[in-house]
Amino acid sequence: MTKHILLLHGPNLNLLGTRQPEIYGKMTLDDINAAVRRHIAPYEIELRIQQSNHEGELVGWLHEARGWADGVVFNPGAYTHTSVALRDAISATELPVIEVHLSNVHGREPFRHRSLLAGVCIGQIAGFGWHSYLLALDALLREWRLKSD
Ligand code: DQA
């Protein structure tokens, strides 16, 4: 049976490739999305990808995901460290959500060490550059496998 994934990118991630490449790498968001599509090609997975710089829009997509998605891979960008609204929206989805970061947020400024979201996600993957997204997808595949066993 086809599984459905929402890949959600938060604020400023539209600038990837040119935004602080020493921290976030040289891949653009389109490059990353293409790598993700290649990675899941062997599986029966339908992927929807959204990016927004607006918190409310991200909340809205999480609400919609309740109706169609089986899991969410989410890089919430800076909202990771500030957003109670996104935390509540993640909880409301009742879906497996994986928080992803390109950079190792725990080795950066102290305000990035705290995630308001990780506690309501099934887990967090950070620090592996664009590869973090592939690791998150693998984690989601594993989660589904564990649930069906
Ligand atoms: C980020 C880490 C956040 O702290 C930062 O605000 C971002 C990107 C990452 O992918 O490493 O915008 O989520």
Image (cartoon, rainbow, N blue to C red):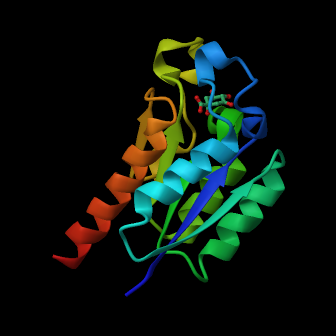
The quadrant of the picture showing ligand 1 is top right
Q: How many marks?
A: 0
> Position of 81 compared to 56: left or right?
left
Q: Looking at the image, is 133 positioned above or below residue 129?
A: below
Quadrant placement of the N terminus:
bottom left
Front residue of 144/80: it is 144
Image quadrant where one finds the C terminus: bottom left
Q: Residue at x 62, y 38 (%)?
A: 80
Q: Residue furthest bottom?
A: 1
Q: Residue 47's spot in the image, x, y percent?
A: 56, 68
From the top left corner, tell me how far across and down residue 76 is, in percent.
64, 43
Left or right: residue 28 versus residue 54 is left
Q: Is residue 57 above or below residue 126?
A: below
Q: Position of residue 136 (x, y in %)?
A: 41, 49
**Up/down of 62 relative to 76, above or below:** below
Which residue is drawn at the image coordinates 54% and 62% (left, top)? 91
Q: Residue at x 84, y 48 (%)?
A: 54
Residue closest to the eye, 40 or 12? 40
Q: Residue at x 54, y 31 (%)?
A: 102
